[in-house]
Amino acid sequence: MEYLFIRYGQGKNSLLTVGKFFGLHLAAIMMLQIVLVARLPWLDRRIGMDRLTVWHRWIGFGLVWTLILHFTFIIVGYADLASQPPWDTFLSLAGVTASLLGMVAAVIILVVASISVRYVRRRLPYEAWHGLHLLLYVALGIGLVHQAFEGTTFDSTWATVYWWSVWGLVLAALLAGRVAVPVWRNLYHRFTVAAVVPESDNVVSVHITGQHLDKLPARAGQFFIWRFPGHHGWWRANPFSLSAAPNGRSLRLTAKAVGKGSAGLRNVPVGSRVFVEGPYGAFTTIHQTRPASLLIAGGVGITPIRALLEEPGGPTTVLYRVHTVEEAVLLPELQALAKARGAQLYVLTGRTGAGTPPNVPFAPANLAAAIPDIVQRDVFVCGPPAMTDAVVHSLRALGVPRRQVHAEKFSLA
Ligand SMILES: Cc1cc2nc3c(=O)[nH]c(=O)nc-3n(C[C@H](O)[C@H](O)[C@H](O)COP(=O)(O)OP(=O)(O)OC[C@H]3O[C@@H](n4cnc5c(N)ncnc54)[C@H](O)[C@@H]3O)c2cc1C
């Protein structure tokens, strides 16, 4: 791309050349952003959706700055060319369809970026934020028409063909990951609710059956995005991990009631259709580097850990952090699985920081005392974001190599 720009990208003055440089990079960043959220199975299995989403978030802010620079240099460049004030140039460019489309796309991107700032994001319901975020597809469409109308970026046919071929591949990846693969999987597997089993007052397991489930490339530790269209609105989609290793005949999710979507699972009718996207996630033993492992779960973060415990492997210890033993859902299953594979299972109770000395089971010294060979193990940790961060921090302090640490936070950026 840099070669194409240097060879064919000169503008009518140096300010416009810089403006075109930022415009080109803006489009390239957009392509990267699309690939990151295209939910391509091979990318997701290697990197994990949580990490891809974090990259998408930070690159998104880079995109906004590139957009501002592109806009500023183009306005100032044309103002310089026409020897008129930038505001007049802005108004005359707004009268040209190609530029106007670019401006509309820019406004949408800036609005979506402003609702993605952490302060605003935390205050918006997930569905509202997600709905507004989808406007970026509109901005993408308008931005593509803007590029096609402008058409002056490369003064060369083959450079133009190359550019649009790359865009074609990126859009094909988006359609494949977001539409074709999920639609095909749901038509092929015909997922249906087989049973709904309460695990406690606020936790429920949903068992799913379907056709050809032995062909579904899911692994213990992964999650799906689930929709129950007949019961919840079709637009409500929630990520839940598999709480049992897939066995080729059924899948199981176990959900804690947090909001409407998760609480409503208790009443999902048996026999109703389920629309599923996935499997996603890199929280699997594919990335395991050592024979021994330590599995750490916090609360309902036990779900993928419970599934991972079914995977064959070397010496294994499970630490299950809950406030009280009564909150420890799936405990009898975990005890049976641990016994069957000779793993140690410890339930760590109590409020963090309470008592003397304070109850901090995941402080580096306490972790090292509980698991003396921790540096020789792969550690899989899943729980609320704060707990997961604290454990990862302690593992770093203890010198556990990064490649041995696998974390799932139950939050996508
Ligand atoms: C990879 C992953 C795996 C998960 N696995 C489990 C599990 O096995 N068991 C379990 O109980 N919980 C799990 N969760 C958490 C679960 O997804 C949320 O608790 C649930 O979606 C809440 O939705 P709600 O409609 O009940 O509540 P809401 O009040 O609508 O949502 C509460 C919060 O949940 C998050 N959330 C809601 N919908 C989505 C979505 N579509 N995508 C991303 N985040 C969303 C948002 O942060 C939101 O603010 C997982 C989360 C992730 C990201």
Image (cartoon, helix red, strand yellow):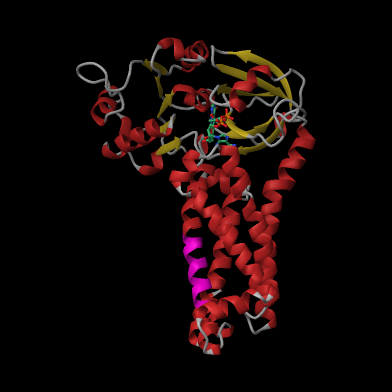
Front position in the image: 197 or 353: 353
Q: What is the span of residues highlighted in magenta in the rendered image? A: 62-74
Which corner quadrant holds the N terminus? bottom right
94 above or below 240?
Answer: below
12 above or below 284?
Answer: below
316 above or below 405?
Answer: above
Left or right? Give the position of 366 relative to 129. Answer: left
Quadrant of residue 169 within the rendered picture: bottom right
Q: Can residue 171 be seen at all in this image of the molecule?
A: yes
Q: How many marks?
A: 0
The residue at the far right in this view is 187
291 above or below 9?
Answer: above
Question: How far across and how far down the image is residue 78, in percent?
Answer: 55, 83
Question: How far across and how far down the image is residue 348, in percent?
Answer: 36, 17
Looking at the image, which residue is at 33% across and 16% down?
350
Left or right? Give the position of 230 relative to 288. Answer: right
Magenta region includes residue 67: yes
Question: How far across and how far down the image is residue 87, in percent?
Answer: 53, 77
Looking at the image, which residue is at 66% across and 55% down?
137
Looking at the image, which residue is at 64% across and 21% down?
265
The residue at the far left in this view is 356
Front position in the image: 271 or 251: 271
Question: How far across and how far down the image is residue 296, in percent?
Answer: 41, 26
Q: Principal SS element in the magenta part?
A: helix
Looking at the image, which residue is at 52% across and 86% down?
84
Q: Can residue 163 be seen at all in this image of the molecule?
A: no
Left or right? Give the position of 133 relative to 122. Answer: right
Magenta region includes residue 168: no
